[in-house]
Image (tube, helix red, strand yellow):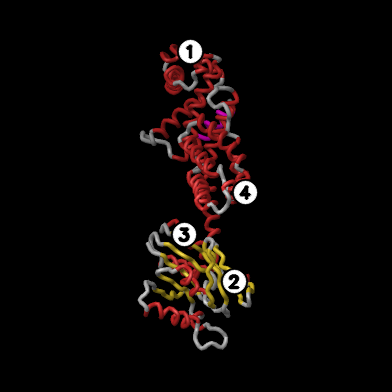
Amino acid sequence: MSLKAISFIGVGKYHPINYIWEEGEKEKSFETHLFPLAVYKFFKPKKLYIFCTERTKTAKREGAKKTYVEEIEEYFKNFAEKGENFSYQFVDIPEGKNVEELWEIFDRLSSVIEEEDELVIDVTHAFRSIPMFSLAVATYLKYTKRVSIKHIVYGAFEASYEKEGKKFAPIFDLGLFLEILKWLSASEKFLEFSYGITLGSILKETHTGLWKEKKSRAEELPRKLKRVGGALEGFSYAVWLAQPVEIMKRANNLVKLLKEALSEFEAWAKPFKVILERVLQRIERISYPEPEVLSEENLKVQKRICRFLLEQNLYMQAIAVAREWLISWIILKSGNEEWIKNWRDNRKVRNFIEKDLGRINAYYSKGNEKTLKEMQNKYIFKMTEEFDLKGMLTLLFDTRNEIAHCGMKKEAKPPEALLENIKKVIEKIEKL
């Protein structure tokens, strides 16, 4: 792993100015008209790649004898003579006039960076759409080569100011844009698939980092970001492991925490604040304060969980929860206080109902008269007849079993057919 830097030279008329770089509470300055030199001065990379076009190679300041390329070579020649652990290289690129040339630039940029490098990207003298393109390359390298992007810098000459007779220009760190992309990517995973591990991790890292830096007074630092991060992760585990009681419980807790931490998001996690409303819309409808007490309201929320899982493309979880929902529905409909009290007890209640439903489904599928005689006076059989569960039972049990056994049976249904069956089961459940 080594620190590398990428920089650019264009054909502009560059003028000397004191560039200012703030590093913590320290401020460094360096006077130059060629920002690649400032990149070396401020960040001390082991290798500096300077990208330039054919036109760039002849560009120079008005009245100057040497080109920009020659000036850079002359400046860095001294470092080579002193034997410093530093090297630089000019890399030819096209001007980016069309899509093909942009892809060529993309290849040249990504090819000079190796796995797990640390990287500084300078876009000060970059031309046309290269600054925007560099952000895309940075994101690509971050995820494909596990590159650590230390800074994306821009020497803002146009934001210059005078002080004590000298001209200064601030250097902006555009790494914020990568942070926003990271937040957006993590948020998308949560909103689309209820995968909150990445988003939760970012919130916890933000919380811990702020407390380590202690740039503000302790009373102003966040106190709930870490808890929200943990709650997001816990909610995700419950969803992905298809545990409706835990989903309701953790969603309820998460909604409370999100609302309590609103001001902290505004101050310390603005990207999350932007998507907060969408997150709340998704999880409020499946939160419930008394998930362990079987009631009509509880079952209504569980129905919404089935629909939620379907919308999140979590099909295996959706059919698994749908099957358990039917058993819970039968328990509540029975009015049997002992059953309702022990509705989550497998040995006392659920296994008994599950076996009877399996036998009833076998009768519907195979028409076994012996099974009919054994079952017809039972409460569960009467319910299946009263509510016309025949078609749904077969669809639910067959689909769930085929998915649970990973299609390991003769004449297994294709995935598309199973998905359609899951949708039909949930539609039927929603009507009960």
Q: Which mark is residue 140?
A: 3
Return the x and y of residue 241 as percentages of the image width and height: 45, 35
* Kind of residue sitting beneath label 3: Tyr
Q: CA distance from mark 3 to mark 2?
A: 30 Å
Q: Which mark is residue 376?
A: 1
Return the x and y of residue 63 as percentages of the image width and height: 56, 88
Q: CA distance from mark 1 to mark 3?
A: 64 Å
Return the x and y of residue 147 as percentages of the image width and height: 43, 59
* Kind of residue sitting beneath label 1: Gln
Give residue 297's quadrant in the image.
top right
- Contact (Cβ within 8 Å) of mark 2 with mark 1: no
Q: Which residues are magenta?
A: 422-430
Q: Residues within 10 Å of mark 3 (few under 14, many from 20)?
A: some
Compared to residue 75, the image places residue 292 above or below, namely: above
Q: Secondary structure under badge 4? A: helix
Point out the tag, 2 or 1, that comes first from the N-terminus. Answer: 2
Q: Nearer the viewer, mark 1 or mark 3?
A: 3
Point out the tag, 3 or 2, that comes first from the N-terminus. Answer: 3
Compared to residue 294, the image places residue 247 above or below, namely: below
- Contact (Cβ within 8 Å) of mark 4 with mark 1: no
* Kind of residue sitting beneath label 4: Glu
| Foreground pick, 399 / 163 | 163
Q: Nearer the viewer, mark 4 or mark 1?
A: 4
Q: Nearer the viewer, mark 3 or mark 2?
A: 2
Q: CA distance from mark 4 to mark 1?
A: 62 Å
Compared to residue 255, the image places residue 19 above or below, namely: below
* Kind of residue sitting beneath label 2: Ala
Q: Nearer the viewer, mark 2 or mark 1?
A: 2
